[in-house]
Image (cartoon, grey):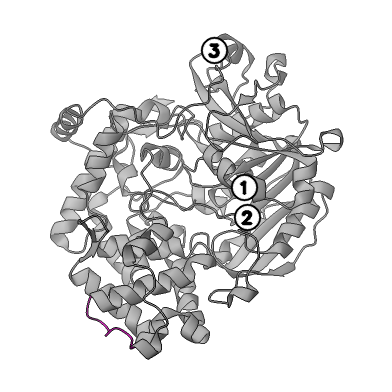
Amino acid sequence: MTMRSTASRRARAATSPALSLLVIGTLLLAGAIPATGAPRPTTPPASAEAATTTATPAAEPAEASALAEDIPWTTCATEGADAFDCATIEVPSDYDKPRGRTTTIAATRLPALDQENRIGSVLVNFGGPGGEGVSTLHAIGEALFDPSVRERFDIVSFDPRAVGLSDPATCFPTQEAEQEFLASSLDLPLNRAEDARFLREAAALGTACTVFGGDRIATASTANVARDMDVLRERLGDDAITYVGYSYGTVLGATYAALFPDNVRALVLDGTIDPRVWSADADGELLGTRLRQAEGATETHAEFLRLCVEAGERCALNALGDPEEVVEAVYEAVKAQPVEIPIGDGTTFELRYGTLIAQVFFSMYGTASWPDLATLLAQLAVLTGVASPPSAAEKRDSGPSVSELLRRLGYTEDYPSVGSGFATACVDLEFPGRPASYPRKVAALDEQYPHFGLFRGWTGIQCEYIAADDEDVYKGSWEQTTQQPVLVIGTRFDPATHYGFTAPYASLWPDPRMLTVDGWGHTTIGVSTCADAAIARYLVTLEADDGAVCQQDLVPFAPSAGLRSDEPPVLPAPRFPGLLGLTS
């Protein structure tokens, strides 16, 4: 673990002492509400003594006998999580110092239905970085996998270090102070004056994260999370790990296999990011360019509009004219003038361009929300004067309000701490190192990929000002040596993890089995019974076909008769999309 000044690393910009003091002084004026986001499990943590005497050096399997102790599962304190068990364990903050400080890892388990024929545990990471495993598994765990997996495996997830219930990295002394800062900050800059303000706010936030959460950020590398996973594997009683990773979780899976190649039973890697891109030097290039999210979002958005046209009256935009022209006009209108939206209690919400583009991007994660997204854009077209309201003959009812659509699309959720999202990304990834160069580079990316280039181009700007390095970051080699077959999955039109990463990712493994979902959205959760069956077959039997293609069940804008009869689980989008929201 290393804490250093921002000037000590090429990829970070210098932050003035005056600015640091100004930020610290401002933040300390806030109240005293704990920034935890959710109650902790009631299980007392394992003793620090036990953890510090049993941890192993970095990049080596856990061997000490105490790590094989059962995890102290107990009833979860969270309402509605009666089917789950919860626990916390202690692991070294820095695996180079196994007898030093510890950090808490919160985990949860959904026990296998057939304990007599139980194979083991499936450990799940839902992405991010910064995604919460405990709350997400509680929300969707019972519907996440095919019943055959639920029968034979305990389903386990955890909040990675510095996230959620696992000693979160916080950037403010209170949740109230954090929300106040975010509420007053720009979503995206739209001119030179706003560029300068956006950079100042990024510097302020980065400095605050360093002050209040820098010690936790400085040990939050993906490599250390992988080491935590191996401790969990050992304490779960599994000789080898069975792992399912979504989105950023595929980087975590590749890192785990590189560090512990002999401890792998099965890996499902869904929505891949090429780890060579993840760990590469920036060479002055924007992170948003390297991750290809602007490209993926542009391609998926084009599919959204194409399928809307084909859907006819099932897509609300068709009642106003050509959907592509209407939507483009809406974007330009909101960019020129934010829209005041009544929210039902006599107040209004100002919808800015950056917020709208973020909402469109994350709404493309799952096709079930596409009709609501189209309706939202249609209503905004009317509110902005882009289009006249459809006649009574063209609409069957007035439909939901804009505020109701925003609630349906998840915009109104409360923020968790932003530091959880920065922790791993800011120490893992390289950034251009010159914040002043961002406006020019973002503008070029936005010219290539309109709207989404602006949104994704600024990704990670706050990391330029976070003064924390983790010496244990893993940079490769990424040529894997684990001999077990691995199941690598990509979706044709994924806005967050570009399909173009799938084949290169698969090529890193000795025995890859590549599955393509011929559809739209981010990862396969809840969208394809064919993919669900392939994942279940692989997890249970370790068998999978290479080159298989699955169709999607939830076809965008399809009549209700063509949809799944059950309520599918949905991978949650990042809850602070204007800040980092790398992949989820």
Location of residue 335 with respect to 424 vertically, above or below: below
Name the N-terminal-most of marks 3 and 1: 3
Mark 2 lies on a secondary structure that is strand
**Residue highlighted by disc 3:** 48
Amino acid on which the number 3 mark rests in the picture: Ala
User: Callout 2 environment at 10 Å: few (<14), some (14 to 19), or many (20+)?
Assistant: many
Residue identifier under label 2: 270
Q: Position of residue 188 (x, y in %)?
A: 26, 58
318 left or right, relative to 179: right
Mark with earlier residue (1, 2): 1
* Residues at discs 1 and 2 in contact (Cβ within 8 Å): yes
Spatial CA distance of label 1 from label 2 is 6 Å
Q: Position of residue 315 (x, y in %)?
A: 46, 80
Depth check, front residue: 413 or 169: 413
The number of numbered discs placed on residues in the rendered structure image is 3
Give the mark, 2 or 3, whose residue is nearer the N terminus. Answer: 3
- Label 1 amino acid? Gly
Image quarter hosting the N terminus = top left
Q: Which residue is mark 1?
A: 245
Q: Residues within 10 Å of mark 3 (few under 14, many from 20)?
A: some
Q: Is residue 165 visible?
A: yes
Spatial CA distance of label 2 from label 3 is 35 Å
